[in-house]
Amino acid sequence: MSNRCSNPDNLPDRPGVYIMRNIDDDVIYVGKAKSLIKRVKSYFSRSELPLKTKLLMSHFHNLEYIITDTEKEALILESNLIKKYKPKYNIRLKDDKRYPYIKITNEKFPRILITRNVRDDGAFYYGPFTDVGSVRRMVKSLKAIFKIRACRKMDGPCLNYQIHLCSAPCGGKITETSYNEIVEKINLFFEGKYNKIIDMLNEMMTEAAENHEFEKAAVLRDQILSVDSILEKQKIEFDRGLEQDVIACSYDEKLACVVVFSIRDGKIIGKDDFLMSGTEGTLPDKILSAFLKQYYMSPRHVPSEIIIQYKPDEKDLIEEWLSSNQEYEVALRTPQNVTETRLVQMVAKNAEIIKNQEKEVRNTLLDLKKYIRLPKIPRHIECFDISNISGKHAVGSMVVFEDGMPKKSKYRKFKVDIPGPDDYAMMKDVLSRRYSRIATGDNDKKPDLIIVDGGKGQLNVAVDVLKSVNLDDIPAIGLAKEFEHVFVPNNSSPIILPRNSEALHLLQRIRDEAHRFAVTYHKKLRSRELKYSMLDGIKGVGEKRKIKLLKHFGDINSIKNASVEEIASVESINKNLAFTIYKHLHKSSAA
């Protein structure tokens, strides 16, 4: 139960969590304390406060507190509340929800899924992972190795069973006990206990062979080889049985990046990197302490040793908390030998590279904000392009860049059914379809910036569409190809960015990617018409002549409306073949 308090002298001398709010009642800071009264009074009694704390107190209005039985309980509650409220002045994992988890469902015959939502539903969750591509490949491999079902409804053996990708529990091809044994191996895999899996599979294979179950033994042999092949990809190997997480950070006055290397059974099995926000003016021991509390609060395997670059603030308390959820003691320590020192240095170097890359992107986005006078940094940008030939096979593309990088999972393509080569009408159609969805409550978030490929005309179309759906608060620009001029609303003159500007280079990359995506889709539709068209089956008309006819006339309807003489004017088509084509198309039409 939480309590409100306006006077710190009235706080209890008990462990707990305090929640600071501003005048609008927004949570601006969450902290924990062994003694609430002593900790909170320090904010008011000290004359010299760090700059960040001074800023916090300048916005402080009232206080809420929750009493806990122990400091460890306060630590857990603090981490949960930071994750819930994302207070401005707390150090926190940046955009934690964007990272995917692997989920093993809580079902009679469990499935393996990729999710971004962790729920208290009895399922096993592993993660978060920062590389969604590697997560997808891993899940695909595990499904193939262990033949785990992928279907939502268990309504009989499907194609996956026929091609040996599923053990078909829906058809009674495997018992629940045997299936759960497989799931247990997958849990061991995500905990990094590869050698235990190999030993278990070898034992089962030997038993199957001794019982003359040669088909089962062959399946187990293949599983062993598949797991071995995964292990062989690990480039650095340590002593067998070693289990550690190695954590280091790189930070400056504005940005901090933390990198984790996971070592299981003596092999580096993964690397994750996380950006931290709210770290201004904070020493590395406090950054790493905040990271540890939030990182291990997520459902994940905790190794027996965590090697860390600096001794973290609250080391003993964090060790106690981590150990309380395990069957073993968790040791949190700095490097103790040459190998560990070099490993931490390697992790720190990775963090430094990632931090510098992030700074470059951030500076580019800041320059872009400044040049085109945006209200905030354009972290989420959507760009549109139209592709067609004389109005035929018209398509639109939308590409998304987040923090200066393409987000291909959010790309969208549009078929456009607008007569004639009317680029403005086509752009209007695509933008209307996109933003009417957001305006009517679609889950997609509003972009920070919209780019249309083109000049003032295309930009005016975008402005009109946004006004029509009450989204005219979203900034929009047009990028004209010829001189790379940037057009903004309510300004007749374009903005000319410096040729060597990284902001201009980013706009060009985004525009070019939208163009590439549109042209690729356009070519796909055209090739589909080439592959399956009414010209098929005409004697004397192969792929080359089909292409020449479609290039000359634009589409099938134009060929159908052409006279024999007009068809015969196409290169390599004589009058007899032209008559055959004319007759075939009109016969097809009559039919």
Image: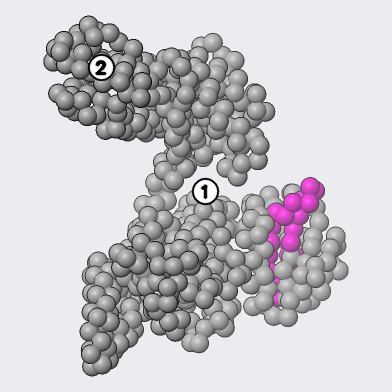
Q: Secondary structure at mark 1?
A: loop
- In front: mark 2 or mark 1? 2
- Residue 22 belongs to magenta span: yes
| 9, 476: nearer the viewer | 476
Residue 154 image position (x, y, % from top left): 48, 67
Say which residue appears at 77% left-offset and 77% top-offset. Answer: 14
Residue 2 in magenta stretch = no
Q: Which mark is residue 583?
A: 2
Report the residue at 79% width, 76% height from top: 13
The magenta region covers 19-42
Q: Going from the N terminus, do you reach mark 2 or mark 1 first?
A: 1
- Toward which corner of the image does residue 19 lie, by quadrant? bottom right
Q: Is residue 461 above or below residue 286?
A: above
Q: Nearer the viewer, residue 290 or 562?
A: 562
Question: So how many labels did they put on this image?
Answer: 2
Q: Is residue 546 above or below residue 390?
A: below
Disc 2 crowd, CA 10 A, few/some/many (<14, 14-19, 20+)? some
- Quickly name the residue at label 1: 254
In the rendered image, the residue lying farthest to the bottom is 210
* Residue 153 horizontal/vertical position (percent): 50, 64
Residue 409 lies left or right of residue 337; in this view the side is right
Above or below: residue 85 compared with residue 321: above
Which image quadrant: the N terminus? bottom right
| Residue 337 shown left or right of residue 82 in the figure | left
Dots 2, 1 in contact, CB < 8 A: no
The three-letter amino acid code for the residue at tag 2 is Lys
Pick the quarter of the image with the C terminus.
top left
